[in-house]
Amino acid sequence: MIVVTGATGNVGRPLTQALAEAGEQVTAVSRHAAAVPDGVRHVPADLTEPAGLTPVLDGAKALFLLLSGDLHAPEARPTDIIDLAAASGVRRVVLLSSQGVATRPLGPSRIAMRAVEDALRESGLEWAVLRPGGFASNALAWAESVRTQGTVAAPFGDVGVPIVDPADIAEVAAACLLDDRHTGKVFELTGPEVITPRRQAQAIAAALGAPVRFHELTREEAKAAMTRFVPPELADDTLDIIAAPNPAELRISPDTERILGRAPRPFDDWVTRNIAAFR
């Protein structure tokens, strides 16, 4: 049995589906009740209280660990989940980390995530670490303003990074959970091209067949919006990257293609599949 945390999110949902289609027994974990694919067991659980995962992990052979925003807060103890997995007899953990662990190692949220990676390496478990950059699905934050005002509002409109499709992350995660060849490795996951927020707005407009105006936010405005969902430290670390990406953050990683045998999906593909959210 494989346990997937964050199972109703943009990565967890396609990962759960892929594992179920591969014939695996899957337990989907999320904070709230949600629909899951046929044959998948769903268990509501709060990862900030790891003890509640004890019955979930009993009998599991593998765990996909996605840390929710509150687990990036300074007082959080996400390494407790790794300890619990080891104590429960889990054999393999695939951790969704962040590209910034390598490219911005001194950022507060990156230091904390590095500690989680280190704990996993030292746990005695089989492991793989996924380090994606920005997610294409972050564009869903614009959905309401596109629907109601025909506007995308974002900072640093002409600064781009190679954002990654969460469906690609999910496919790589499935491969790491199921294939021994990927054990003990770190994979950097990006999209196939550098794309700016202004260009993303244009892609949404093209898919809608309607104009979409781009409005540039200040850094302060963007941080105020982000901190409604994530700790301020994580917001600042993210904004540092999208304001002035360094060469490592602009690099197109070959890892997705190496694992999946195909190029990563471009942002336009993600928009086409998700355009209903913007109508």
Image (cartoon, helix red, strand yellow):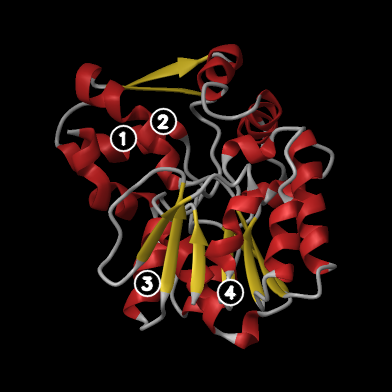
- Sequence-wise, which precedes: disc 4 or disc 3? 3
Q: Earlier in the sequence, mark 3 or mark 1?
A: 3
| Callout in the foreground (2, 3) | 3
Q: What type is the residue that disc 4 sits on?
A: Ala
At label 1, the amino acid type is Gln
Spatial CA span between label 1 and label 2? 6 Å
Q: Is residue 165 visible?
A: no
Label 4 element class:
strand
Which image quarter holds the C terminus?
top left
Q: CA distance from mark 3 to mark 1?
A: 31 Å
Q: Pointer 3: what residue?
A: 18
Residue 198: mark in rendering = 2
Q: What number is the disc on residue 202?
A: 1
What residue lies at 64% left-to-right and 34% top-to-bottom? Answer: 238
Residue type at the position of mark 2: Arg
Q: Are marks 2 and 3 in contact (CB under 8 Å)?
A: no
Of discs 3 and 1, which sits in the foreground? 3
First-in-chain label (4 vs 1): 4
In-image side of 153 versus 95 (left or right)? left
Cα distance in 3D space between marks 4 and 2 = 40 Å
Q: Residue 81 versus residue 273: which sits nearer the camera? A: 81
In front of the other: 132 or 184: 184
Task: Pick whichever, 41 or 14, lies toward us.
Answer: 41
Amino acid identity at mark 3? Ala
Q: Residue visible at 60% across and 34% down? A: 242
Label 1–label 2 contact, CB within 8 A: yes
C-alpha separation, residue under disc 4 versus residue under disc 3: 15 Å
Q: Secondary structure at mark 2?
A: helix
Up the image or down, 191 lies above or below 18; here it is above
Image disc number at residue 62: 4
